Image: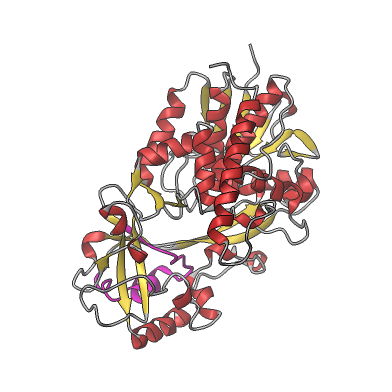
């Protein structure tokens, strides 16, 4: 009997890696510590649970690097994208999902797969070499015993930063005499997409009072050993943004552009707070970009200052958690294997990618690379001209090891194209050229993957 490939961690990356290995016809054992050991961010024991936003961000595969990553994962038969599409919610040009239905669907598909075994319980140290090929996809909430074991074998301290969670509001508690539905610039192909966001406007006085309240609110206190841990720039708490300048939020998540208030169409809002639908029923909305480390009591008081949310009821208040990742450019080879122990691969956010889709994509590639190796085949990762390949190249050597920080996929990671206009005016042409090249190269890479069973 073929020895199974083990995966530690049942999040986005681990679930996708398990699916890819199982679909290649090889047995896989997926280890997930929940519900035996919980975390302060997870609410269920479901696989691929979304703990922050419910958005997979842009679904535009011609002008956006994230949308291109969606396309590549769909082309590769990714479970995460299949279930995201099946449980999608209106979100303008973005892809958002019903988080509970999505997680349940991923869990059910993996449980039902004949090549997948799921073992519940914490793995408290590095797996024994007798396990053979193993993928560690424990994500940003890697348990302390396992994190310490990883530090021991790498000889390096794992880097860490804080990631914050946005509050979720019950839709029926929003005052619709002040709020309205509209996506910025009415973006989207359907009426649902064009009205995917709830908007709460502020005038200048309200905005300044709101900033004062954020700055004055009591915040979560960090332990001494946590105080020097940096935030990820793409997921800053609102109070950290406010501390950087009074206008920072107004030019960030509270920018008032592309919106017209039907209650007062002649008046331009000074700032706008947006809420995005969080479940298929439309009963829950998360406050976009409002990750926070304010204490719970202060959150309710401060957020009730937002016009339309004066009587808001919260299904979940914001929170903050420690996020752990490797110094991957120094520690991992281009097969995503730990140089100090090549039987161990890493995937997901622990490798230093940021975002649900990026995490799942690293799981997809790690699964395929592990399957190819198990069959005694040599397989290169996707070329750096693809979204997936650009990420792998970045985390396994493209980034500066000393200054390495978590990274979302973006066109800045792609090799440049000759003969394409530069600058702002040529951006659309350049992005379309990037995505056209990527799709062709990714399809060629898929065709070269001999670890897949014949159709």
The way the protein has been coloured in the rendering is secondary structure
Direction from residue 140 to residue 152 in the image, left or right: right
Q: Give the range drawn in magenta.
A: 285-311
In reply to whether residue 326 is colored magenta, the answer given is no
- Residue 347, x across and y down, in percent: 63, 41
Which of 429 and 416 lies nearest the eye of the viewer?
429
- Residue 239, x across and y down, in percent: 49, 75
* Residue drawn at the location 78% of the way across and 36% of the way down: 341
Is residue 144 in sight in this rendering?
A: no
Quarter location, residue 229: bottom right
* Residue drawn at the location 65% of the way across and 68% of the way down: 224
Check the image and report above or below for 386 versus 453.
Answer: below
* Residue drawn at the location 30% of the way across and 58% of the way down: 194
Quadrant position of the N terminus in the picture: top right
Which of 196 and 11 lies nearest the eye of the viewer?
196
- Considering every residue shown, the one lying at the far front of the view is 419
- Considering every residue shown, the one lying at the far top of the view is 1
Quarter location, residue 211: bottom left
In reply to whether residue 290 is colored magenta, the answer given is yes
Is residue 20 in sight in this rendering?
A: yes
Direction from residue 374 to residue 163 in the image, left or right: left
- Residue 381, x across and y down, in percent: 69, 36
- Residue 409, x across and y down, in percent: 59, 52
* Residue drawn at the location 69% of the way across and 22% of the way down: 374
Check the image and report above or below for 169 versus 388.
Answer: below
Check the image and report above or below for 293 versus 141.
Answer: below
Check the image and report above or below for 393 versus 316.
Answer: above
């Amino acid at each position: 009997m073929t020895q199974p490939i083990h995966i530690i961690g049942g999040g986005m990356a681990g679930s996708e890696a398990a699916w890819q290995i199982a679909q290649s016809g090889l047995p896989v054992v997926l280890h997930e510590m929940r519900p035996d050991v919980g975390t302060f961010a997870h609410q269920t024991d479901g696989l691929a649970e979304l703990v922050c936003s419910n958005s997979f961000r842009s679904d535009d595969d011609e002008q956006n690097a994230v949308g291109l990553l969606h396309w590549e994962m769909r082309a590769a038969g990714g479970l995460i994208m299949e279930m995201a599409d099946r449980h999608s919610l209106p979100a303008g040009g973005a892809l958002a999902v019903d988080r509970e239905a999505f997680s349940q669907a991923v869990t059910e598909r993996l449980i039902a797969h004949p090549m997948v075994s799921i073992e519940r319980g914490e793995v408290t140290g590095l797996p024994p070499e007798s396990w053979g090929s193993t993928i560690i996809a424990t994500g940003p909430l890697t348990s302390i015993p396992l994190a310490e074991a990883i530090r021991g074998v790498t000889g390096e301290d794992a880097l860490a930063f804080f990631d914050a969670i946005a509050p979720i509001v019950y839709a029926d508690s929003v005052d619709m005499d002040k709020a309205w539905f509209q996506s910025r610039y009415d973006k989207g192909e359907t009426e649902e997409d064009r009205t995917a966001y709830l908007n709460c406007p502020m005038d200048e006085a309200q905005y300044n009072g709101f900033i004062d309240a954020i700055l004055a609110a009591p915040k979560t206190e960090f332990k001494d050993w946590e105080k020097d841990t940096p935030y990820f720039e793409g997921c800053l708490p609102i109070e950290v943004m406010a501390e950087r300048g009074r206008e920072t939020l107004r030019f960030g998540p509270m920018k008032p552009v592309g919106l017209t208030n039907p209650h007062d169409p002649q008046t331009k809002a000074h700032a706008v707070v947006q809420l995005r639908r969080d479940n298929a029923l439309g009963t829950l909305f998360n406050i976009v970009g409002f990750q926070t480390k304010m204490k719970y009591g202060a959150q309710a008081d401060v957020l009730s200052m937002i016009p339309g949310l004066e009587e808001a009821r919260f299904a979940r208040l914001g929170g903050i958690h420690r996020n752990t990742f490797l110094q991957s450019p120094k520690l991992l080879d281009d097969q995503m294997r730990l140089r100090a122990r090549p039987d161990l691969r890493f995937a997901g956010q622990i490798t230093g990618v940021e975002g649900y889709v990026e995490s799942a994509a690293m799981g997809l590639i790690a699964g395929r690379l592990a399957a190819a190796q198990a069959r005694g085949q040599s397989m290169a990762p996707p070329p750096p001209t693809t979204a997936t390949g650009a990420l792998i190249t970045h985390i396994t050597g493209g980034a500066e090891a000393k200054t390495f920080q978590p990274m979302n996929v973006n066109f800045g990671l792609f090799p440049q194209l000759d003969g394409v206009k530069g600058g702002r005016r040529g951006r659309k042409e350049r992005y379309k050229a990037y995505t056209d090249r990527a799709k062709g190269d990714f399809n060629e890479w898929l065709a070269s993957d001999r670890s897949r069973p014949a159709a």
